[in-house]
Image (cartoon, coloured by chain):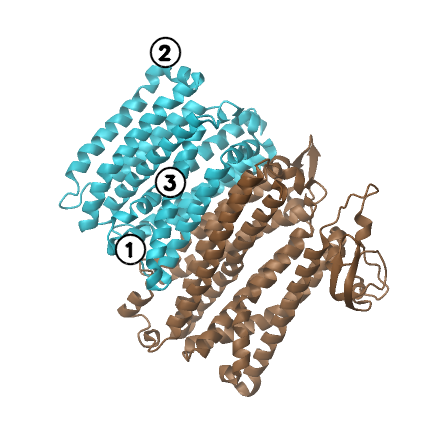
Chain colours: A brown, B cyan
Amino acid sequence: MDTLLLSRIQFGANMSFHILSPTITIALGWMLLAFKLAWQRTGNDKWMEAYRFWVKVFALSFGMGVVSGITMSFQFGTNWPGFMETVGNIAGPLLAYEVLTAFFLEAVFLGIMLFGASRVPVWTHTLATFLVAFGTTMSAFWILVLNSWMHTPVGFEMRDGVAHATDWMAILFNPSMPYRLTHMLLASGLTVAFLIAGVSALRWLWGDRSDAVRATLRTGVFVGAALIPLQILAGDFHGLNTLEHQPAKVAAMEGNWETRGNAPLLLFAVPDEDARENRFEMGIPNGASLILKHHAAGVVPGLNDFVGEDGSVMHPPVAPVFYSFRLMVGTGFAMLFLSWGAAILMTRRRAGVEGLPRPVLWAMVPMALSGWVATLAGWYTTEIGRQPWLVDGVLSTEQAVAAVPAPMVASTLIAYLAVYAALLVAYISAILYLARKAAGGDSPETTTPRGQSMAARVSGE
Amino acid sequence: MTYFGDPTIWLPLAFAVLMGLSILIYVVLDGFDLGVGVLFPFAEPAQKDRMVASIGPFWDANETWLVLAIGILLVAFPTAHGQILTALYLPVAIMLIGLILRGVAFEFRAKAPPARKGLWNLSFYAGSMMTALSQGYMLGMYIMGLEQRPATWAFAALTAVFLTVGYSFIGAAWLILKTEGALQRKAVGWAKGGIWGLILGLGAVSLASPLVSPRIFDKWFTMPEALFLAPLPIISAALVALLWIALRRLPTRDDRFAWFPFTVSIAIFALAFCGMAYSFYPYVVPEKLTIYEAASAPESLFIVLIGTLFVLPMILGYTVLSYRVFRGKATALSYE
């Protein structure tokens, strides 16, 4: 394999591993703030218990996010020097503002949030929790501004092959930013909702009948049920925005080769890029036209429009975009059915958690990770869908890569992959261990909510 | 912008100063928590917990200074960022994996099943070692002008060891400040060993830099500059001597002067850093690229500078707040 492909896989691997943590911490930060405020308002200790359990998951996730984020900041220079050399005047300030307004804020107040509860007044601790949540969200804002600008670059001019900013407001609020940011924040909310529901369901199945586990299971299900329709709507708007600015990506998502009206919505197919056609097509007639153009005869762009006279292909690789898009949408619908089904079962005759049959509870357990699957699939869709460009129409991925020898990239890639695989296993088993411990036996949490023994039990050490 | 003179002159300089400041703050702050990691195998299990407790609330913010430093390099001097990081590809990768291993260990060693704690302790130690060694190696390569030859590798291997031992010194100095009893006495012993890393490291860098580059030699050894510069090595040597004397008397019975080694080591790191900055100015890639040649467009730098001037004092403010909240001797980390 050549340096370009290896570097892309390496960046993809680092990015994929990194995104798992912020996807959880962005929304979990706000969720913890909500638990904390609910406890302060009601005085009901179940909220404090929920806080104490999930703050540990937050700490684990945050640690992974910090260290893999540091990796990201170096990757630009080690593997993609052409990126900053060409668009550094725009990417630079955005990244700098992320570090200045988000990273320090979350890092410093995380210390107080995790370990400072006994050293500061209650309101300061709540404020620290708020600032951590705010910091993670700010971080998402800046990085999605930059990412969106790479998809829909505006507000700049090229001088001697280097981009110079001409309109910062246009850069900040570039055409795809509002859609991408909304889509990502909702994705984070869903990831956390299903994680909380799934882990709580597991605790319930392990025999945990505490008020805290009831409260978090209910919270997870209802937050998930509330967010998923919004996400489907936001995703649809995002798709229309992509159709306007990156039609080649939409063509790959739909697996549509020829520009045409009455384009079907393909439920399944095997795109064959050599033959430039699909095999084993199965679709809903007029579906793609209806979704993208809102009428059956609407003309949908085809991939063949993006092949140059000389045969140069200027559209993304079709199969990965096509499959990951379907994986994302499929996961989204699984989320819809499960959360709505569970919500209906729980509200009917005010049955609560007891209204959930065991198969539904068991279904929630693997769905705890559904947010990760959908988020990754969505990112693969949009990022592979941007190829062959790094910055759409401005800089190709090939132009930006470093001339590092391929074996060097390969060896570091293997090292990263090994570390990431080990950490993922450790992360998931740690959450399972925490859940098992919380579900297990006498549960002193319910009897001594703020006592000394509790301090010893949940202490970081 | 024109009110302040030529922005293509003062903006790169301002960013070089900001970057230098971030690197210095990083080296001191992460230096002590990396040093604590390097010292890990020498401690008893209960002491290990206390050692982690002394850095637990800070390590994350400490590492953010590295992100800021590398961010400024990326933002202000993009060409240099590419050249330096591709030249240091492998040590950077080793450092990053080291940072990952130690960073996750903080939380995992406390939350994973007790049977796994030994593994996470190992991960914390190995990660700290990888990070410290690769940073020292990169320092050596940078001084050698990023040239890949057996002689430069050998020198970088030496600075790798010296910086790691130097970090263990500042780590021990931190533990003298933040702990008490047997662990504190032990830390005094570690500091007595670690101070050699400081002495040898300072010596190696001071000797090698002028020998490698005639330009640096001339900057230090021509009159009258040599006279103005003389206090720098003299004060450093005096501070090391003071440390040496202090370490023989610590810990004192009423814990007075527990702050002394840590404070003095900050001063020594700062002096050494100023010396290096003076040697290399105006180059950001040694002998190849100056800060003025490598700088981004002034408009972009100006936007970042405005933000930095507003936000950096706030960052420093709440960093100080956090060190105040967790002042005094380290206690067991608790979420309560």
Amino acid carrying label 3: it is Ala
- Specify the subunit that label 2 lies on: B
Q: Which of marks 1 and 2 is nearer the N terminus?
A: 1
Report which residue position mark 1 lands on: B49
Provide residue B188's location: percent of width, then percent of height: 21, 42
Label 2: which secondary element = loop
Circles 2 and 3 on the same chain: yes
Report which residue position mark 3 lands on: B132
**Can you tell which quarter of the image residue B106 is in?**
bottom left
In the displayed orientation, state which residue is furthest to the left. Answer: B253
Amino acid carrying label 1: it is Asp
Say which quadrant the C terminus of chain A sits in. bottom left
Mark 2, other Cα within 10 Å: few <14 / some 14–19 / many ≥20 = few
Provide residue B317's location: percent of width, then percent of height: 39, 45
- Specify the subunit that label 3 lies on: B
Q: Can residue A131 be seen in this view?
A: no
Q: Is residue A452 visible?
A: yes
Provide residue B172's location: percent of width, then percent of height: 26, 42
Separation (CA) of disc 2 from disc 3:
37 Å
Q: Which residue is drawn at 44% across and 64% down?
A: A429
Mark 1, other Cα within 10 Å: few <14 / some 14–19 / many ≥20 = many
Separation (CA) of disc 3 from disc 1:
21 Å
Q: Which of marks 3 and 1 is nearer the N terminus?
A: 1
Circles 1 and 2 on the same chain: yes
Amino acid carrying label 2: it is Met
Circles 3 and 1 on the same chain: yes
Q: Which label sits on residue B223?
A: 2
